[in-house]
Image (spheres, helix red, strand yellow):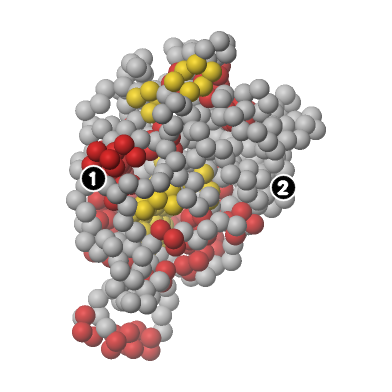
Amino acid sequence: MARVKETVAEVVLLCIVMALSGCQGLGTGTGNSPNGNLQNVNHIIFMVQENRSFDQYFGQLSAYWQSNGFPAQSIDGMPVNASNPTFDGTSTVNSYHVKTTCIENLSPSWNEDHVDWNRQNPTSSTVTSDGFVFTAAKYAQNPPPEDAPILDTAGIRAMGFYDGSDLNYYYFMASNFATSDRWFSPVMTRTQPNRLFLLAATSAGHVYPPTATLSNQTIFGLLQSAGVSWKIYETDPGTTYLNNFQPFASQHSANVVPVSQYMTDVQNGTLPAVAMIEGGYNSGLDEHPKNNVQTGAAYVEGLINALMKSPSWKDSVFILTYDEAGGLYDHVPPMSTVSPDGIPPSDLQPGDICTGGSGGANCDFTVAGFRVPLIIVSPFTKKNFVSHTPADYTAIAKLIEARFKLTPLTKRDAAQMDMTEFFDFKNVPWATPPSPPAQVTTGVCNAQMLQ
């Protein structure tokens, strides 16, 4: 099992203290210690899937709790009257339970996200969340070659949601363990800049995919310098976003291994201190809207269940979230935040929103992206817990920094919560993990069968 460094004397002393328990779980964690804290966690695993909003995935959690006997509590789910204007503005599209496990693509890029924010005034400080149907329709009317043709030219796919009958595994896990209704992507744009934030707590000024590699420090660079073990497990070979950061990625290619090694490490107790699992971006297992959501959820189920059934469970945390909302409706305004490094957007194109000297409330990196789903699975996770603390997912870096006493990467991760509010280290609520249901995989993937 990977552990932070300890002297021989410390090991001997700890064994004496823990003699009655057979010196199990040796490391900086102390299991059920009455004085337990974040040092009980020896393995932090995080996985970021693709393009889902909180409302689309978890907007129906309250109804699930009521139907399944969970305690009633506050959660800011999808409003019953959620709607958006039609593309032509003459009517409305109400939210609805989407029938298909896959839909046609949408765009969550810079311009579209800003129109989603406020259809009539995309840089206004007033968030109306009324542009989702419009941008989905507009994207369908002129899609890029890789997505053409898109038949939903009305854009109604942006308002569809799933519930506990579709995502039964995720609903069970989010309800028994912990989630948040104020968990945001870091920036109002597409996948690549958000994943740069995930690794480096900045996109170095990019709102589009960078055309050159970056030299910024990453969370894995901090760990490497501190002598803390880490790995990246790839579902599909050659797909890690760490490759955006050079020369570090090339210098540490041995730390990037197939996801099959994760299954081995989980069972053998050889997990590193920090691990990232890259989703199946090429194999259709990443939960991207155009892929079968149930197939992707079943894949994640296998990864989490393997951890819960293994010797590694006792001192691990598994964090599942999503890179950005994917152009799918969410009614909660993105939170205000801090610029990570004072660098303004550097790659806006002529005609883009916020170009030509047009300032606005969301024209810099001082506003997060839209909400995304979150599940935190660990023996230390509080039962049935919902956080209402605004944070973007650079909080994952903050958690790692807090655990291993690392310096923040930027002002952005420094400003986040350290995520300890999700845990009860004294009582260890899930020392024995629950038995979740198998993810349903019988849904029909037919993007034309929306309603």
Name the residue at 34% across, 59% down: 381
- The Cα atoms of the two marked residues, 2 and 1, are separated by 49 Å
x and y percent of residue 253 in the render?
46, 54
- SS at mark 1 in the image: loop
x and y percent of residue 67 in the render?
24, 38
> 55 or 398: which is nearer to us?
55
Q: Does the rendering let one see residue 304?
A: no
| Image quadrant in which the C terminus is located | top left
Name the residue at 21% across, 54% down: 434
Disc sitting over residue 146 in the figure: none
Q: Which amino acid does label 2 sit on?
A: Ile
Nearer the N terminus, badge 2 or badge 1? 1
Classify 10 Å Cα crowding around label 2: few (below 14), some (14-19), many (20 and above). Answer: some
Camera-side mark, 2 or 1: 1
x and y percent of residue 31 in the render?
30, 72
Q: Quadrant of residue 353?
A: top right
- SS at mark 2 in the image: loop
- Residue linked to disc 2: 343
Disc sitting over residue 69 in the figure: 1
**Above/below status of 243 relative to 120:** below
Q: Does the rendering let one see residue 104?
A: yes
Q: In which quarter of the image is residue 169?
A: top left
Name the residue at 29% across, 73% down: 32
> 35 or 141: which is nearer to us?
35
Name the residue at 66% across, 22% down: 120
| Image quadrant in which the N terminus is located | bottom left
**Above/below status of 145 relative to 175:** above
**Above/below status of 26 relative to 384:** below
> 206 or 245: which is nearer to us?
206
Viewed as shown, does residue 390 lie left or right of 21?
right
Q: Quadrant of residue 235?
A: top left
